[in-house]
Image (cartoon, rainbow, N blue to C red):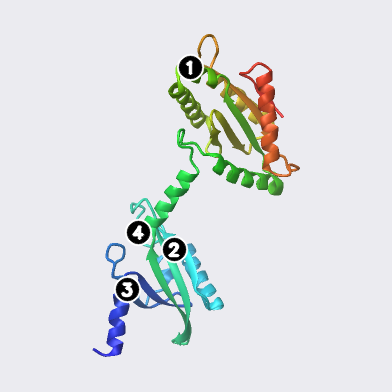
């Protein structure tokens, strides 16, 4: 077997597929893809254009990446997804989840039919992508309640603050806690206190819009963010939420002391130096509600 035949065998044995693509997105050659768990025979692609196979929007994305690689002459690495909706001629009854790939695109130093070409190596990274999503969810989620945690709150409030400053998009912040959790823990046990915290979390989930988010900071302290909500709307929502808490947490009341919730409300202001200013103001409103006799809503 001569060296050319050896090279062809080596290229075809590559587990991931490698595509020789022209600037126009024409498949000039297909190598590898021997890992049958993830890939099908791609030899029938030769001679076709990317735009023959996938929708215009997705095809333009591929052509843009080819152009970037040709302009930079450097290795370009991109993660991307392909679903049944991207591929022409497939019904919407395909897999629910898209397939994720890592594309490594390198400009080559020769022409084919007087056209610049790149080598595009595609690796199926769906399993890795799903694992990374799970890790991010775990790192952003409170273990007891499955609400978002402080880490996610800090990330989201940074974005909300930027939206207020740049686009005047109103965002309200509610901070609240259980008024008598310590008494519940001391009298009925921490396992009952945990049930009360879980009840608060479940009530939050049932009352929020799709754009709202609830967070547990720790202990019995919670925060709700309401996008596109001014102070008046946030106060109305907080009063309604306080009434629901009072009704549904009644089973945790002990010795005449109700398991109620006090709530502090504020809005993120464009002249706040950062989102921490908003949180401090909401916290001040919470203590105002506590001092006024608990089971109250106050704003700042």
Residue occupied by mark 1: 252
* Left or right of 255 on screen, residue 3: left
Outermost residue, bottom side: 2
Q: Of circles 3 and 4, which is in front?
A: 3
Residue drawn at x 29%, y 75% is: 13
Q: Which quadrant of the structure image shows residue 102?
A: bottom left
Query: Can residue 84 be seen in the rendering of this structure?
Result: no
- N-term-proximal mark, 1 vs 4: 4
Residue tagged by mark 2? 55
Mark 2 touches mark 3? (CB < 8 Å): no
Of marks 1 and 2, the one in the foreground: 1
Mark 3 secondary-structure assignment: loop
Residue at disc 4, secondary structure? loop
Among the two numbered marks 4 and 2 on one chain, the one whose residue lies closer to the N terminus: 2
> Which residue is label 3 attached to?
14
Q: Residue at x 30, y 88 (%)?
A: 4
Q: CA distance from mark 2 to mark 3?
A: 28 Å
Label 1 Cα neighbours within 10 Å, binned few <14 / some 14-19 / many ≥20:
some
Give the crowd class for mark 4: few <14, some 14-19, many >=20 residues within 10 Å: few
Residue located at (54% from left, 28% from top): 220
Mark 1 lies on a secondary structure that is helix
Q: Earlier in the sequence, mark 1 or mark 3?
A: 3
Alpha carbon of mark 1 to alpha carbon of mark 4: how far? 55 Å
């Amino acid at each position: 077997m001569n060296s050319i035949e050896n090279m062809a065998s080596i290229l075809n044995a590559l587990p991931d597929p490698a595509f020789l693509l022209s600037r126009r997105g024409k498949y000039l050659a297909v190598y590898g893809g021997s890992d049958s768990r993830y890939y099908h025979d791609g030899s029938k692609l030769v001679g076709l254009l990317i735009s023959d196979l996938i929708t215009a929007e997705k095809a333009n994305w591929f052509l843009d990446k080819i152009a970037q690689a040709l302009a930079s002459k450097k290795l370009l690495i991109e993660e991307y997804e392909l679903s049944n909706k991207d591929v022409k001629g497939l019904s919407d009854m395909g897999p629910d989840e898209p397939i994720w790939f890592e594309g490594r695109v390198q400009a080559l130093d020769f022409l084919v039919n007087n056209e610049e070409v790149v080598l595009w190596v595609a690796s199926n990274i769906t399993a890795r992508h799903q694992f990374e999503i799970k890790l991010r969810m775990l790192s952003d989620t409170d273990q007891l309640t499955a609400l978002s945690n402080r880490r996610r709150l800090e990330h989201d409030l940074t974005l909300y603050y930027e939206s207020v400053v740049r686009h005047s998009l109103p965002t309200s912040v509610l901070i609240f806690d259980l008024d008598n959790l310590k008494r519940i823990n001391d009298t009925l046990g921490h396992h009952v206190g945990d049930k009360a915290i879980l009840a608060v979390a479940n009530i939050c989930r049932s009352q929020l819009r799709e754009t709202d988010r609830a967070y547990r900071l720790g202990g019995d302290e919670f925060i709700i963010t309401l996008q596109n909500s001014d102070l008046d709307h946030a106060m109305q929502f907080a009063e309604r939420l306080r009434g629901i808490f009072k009704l549904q947490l009644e089973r945790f009341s002990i010795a005449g002391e109700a398991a109620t919730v006090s709530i502090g409300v504020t809005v993120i202001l464009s002249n706040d130096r950062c989102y921490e200013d908003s949180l401090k103001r909401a916290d001040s409103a919470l203590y105002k509600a506590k001092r006024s006799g608990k089971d109250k809503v106050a704003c700042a």
